[in-house]
Image (spheres, helix red, strand yellow):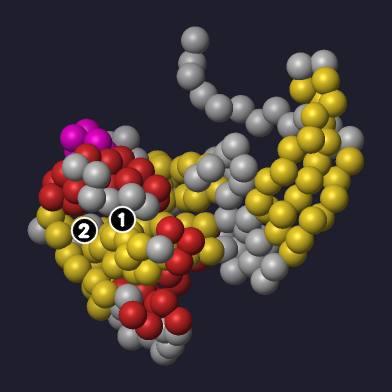
Amino acid sequence: MTIADVKDPKETLSRTDEWRGALFGMVTEEIEAGGTRVTRNYLEHPGAVAVVALDDQGRVVLINQYRHAVRARLWEIPAGLIDYVGEDYLEAAKRELAEETELAADTWHVLVDMFSSPGCSNESVRIFLARDLHSVETDFVREGEEAEMTMDVVDLDEAADAVLDGRIHSPSAIAGLLAAVRARESNWESLRPADAPWLR
């Protein structure tokens, strides 16, 4: 048996848009599951990208940013939202890497795909591995929490140790860093192309 998630949408019997903000919405839907009509609430999310940016010395770029929902400054990998319906995920990843780190990469692969919290959100996140890094100029102006963001470059193994020691809590950083260590063990042969199909 092959272990693989599959799309299997249940019929939506009713839907109510409870709330709609600038970026997200809260939805209530009724479906039939297990022979019973049930109500499910979830956060409707545009999708996101994240980037494990690895330099030629095996160091990864980490961002330190305040996250108000958890009242903490978190070490993360560069990441951001899909800006509009249909935006190419790779182009979004390139944009976020440039805006947050003033870096670009010549080599891109898919590292891992995930649903960040499938019990209560439809957020899909594609995490890329970016290599062959170089500096790039950008006119992006950071505002709010991003204006206070700092950056560091650390050894990939050190970053993975921080995950396992409980010092890094961002889900995209956890998934991306551990996946990068695993992919490195196979000499990167397990990587998928940057436009690989996925379940979102």
Q: Which residue is mark 1?
A: 52
> Residue 46, position in %: x, y?
63, 58
What residue do we see at 59% from left, 69% from top?
83
Q: In front: 76, or 89?
A: 76
Q: Which residue is mark 2?
A: 60
| Residue stretch in magenta | 182-187
Instruction: Point out the tag, 2 or 1, that comes first from the N-terminus.
Output: 1
Amino acid type at circle 1 is Val
Give the quarter of the figure containing the C terminus: top right
> Residue 20, position in %: x, y?
74, 64
- Tag count in the figure? 2
Q: From the viewer's perspective, is 138 left or right of 38? A: left
Taking 196 as reference, is 71 above or below it? below
Q: Give the spatial CA distance, label 2 vs label 1.
A: 7 Å
Q: In front: 106, or 58?
A: 58
Which of the 4 image quarters holds residue 41? Answer: top right
What residue do we see at 18% from left, 35% from top?
185
Residue 14 falls within the magenta-colored stretch: no
Q: Is residue 195 visible?
A: no
> Residue 57, position in %: x, y?
10, 58
| Cβ atoms at labels 2 and 1 below 8 Å apart | yes
Q: From the viewer's perspective, is 37 left or right of 116? A: right
Which of the 4 image quarters holds residue 101? Answer: bottom left
Q: Majority secondary structure of the magenta segment?
A: helix
Which of the 4 image quarters holds residue 136? Answer: bottom left
Neighbour class for label 2 at 10 Å: few (<14), some, many (≥20)?
Answer: many
Taking 179 as reference, is 79 above or below it? below
Q: In front: 32, or 60?
A: 32
Amino acid type at circle 2 is Val
Helix, strand or loop for disc 1: strand
Q: Is residue 161 visible?
A: yes
> Residue 25, position in %: x, y?
71, 59
